[in-house]
Amino acid sequence: MAANNPTAGPQPVMHTQEATPAIADPAPLGLAGFGVTTMMLSFINAGIIGAGATTAVLPMAAAYGGFAQLLAGMWAFKRGNTFAATAFTSYGAFWFSYYLLVGVWAKTVTPADASPIIGMYLFMWGVFTLYMFVASLGGTKAVMVVFFLLFVTFFLLAFGTWGNAAAGHGLTEIGGYVGILTAIAALYTSFADVTNATFRRIILPTN
């Protein structure tokens, strides 16, 4: 799809096409960094892997989910793609903030004290993702699915954090499974984008 053009109005797409692009499309990298890290954390949220493994997600959150997505966001700015730049830079920052939240701040407070603000943290990311989902309606269906599943995931995790022990745990597990679907959708879109770019024709559909 075409890059955002101020004279043509906003075009909320995850990737761009140019006659002679200065740099490669950063979308496959950003989606892969997001998808891999989200998959790891979602297996823990779903209860498939024990919560004790959460700290093992932190290196991936910083390096791939955070740094790689931040780079993808900067390249998207360079290509003139406002939607991708906002998405990748923001979710790169999300994974950096998650690293600090779990690796630093959470160690200084009790779980009871942490729950209200962590719930708000997740809820506000859900709000951001919801309006990015609305913007994604102007792009490909594959990207739209990623953002739809992601905002549902954030809200489930937020209300799971705010809920009582039994109800909250159940919502968190459901959020984990929806997060797995989100990661699969992101990884598929990354796979499709990089495959289609390599073969220079549509091998895997995203619309």
Image (cartoon, rainbow, N blue to C red):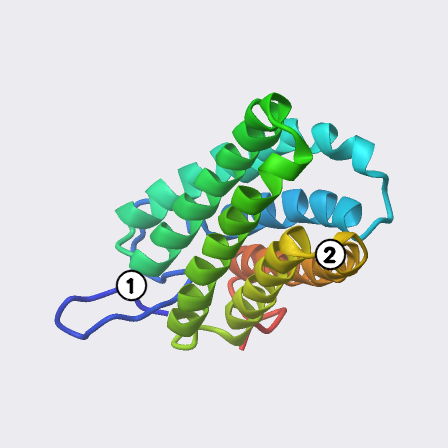
Few, some or many residues within 10 Å of mark 1 (<14, 14–19, 20+): many
Residue 135's quadrant in the figure? Answer: bottom left
Q: What residue is shown at x 41% (from left), y 73% (from top)? A: 134
Residue underneath mark 1: 3
- Provide residue 37's location: percent of width, then percent of height: 65, 42
Sequence-wise first label, 1 or 2: 1
The type of residue carrying mark 1 is Ala
Image check: 67 left or right of 190? left
Q: Is residue 126 above or below residue 37?
A: below
Image check: 45 left or right of 117? right
Numbered mark located on residue 128 in the image: none
Q: What residue is shown at x 41% (from left), y 53% (from top)? A: 87
- Provide residue 50's location: percent of width, then percent of height: 85, 39
Image check: 56 left or right of 191? right
Q: Is residue 62 visible?
A: no
Provide the secondary structure element on which disc 2 rests: helix
Q: What residue is shown at x 56% (from left), y 54% (from top)? A: 194
- Provide residue 146's location: percent of width, then percent of height: 57, 65
The answer for how far apart the CA atoms under marks 1 and 2 are is: 42 Å
Q: Nearer the viewer, residue 27 or 58?
A: 58
Q: Is residue 85 above or below residue 50?
A: below
Q: What residue is shown at x 29% (from left), y 63% (from top)? A: 3
**In front: label 1 or label 2:** 2
Numbered mark located on residue 168 in the image: 2
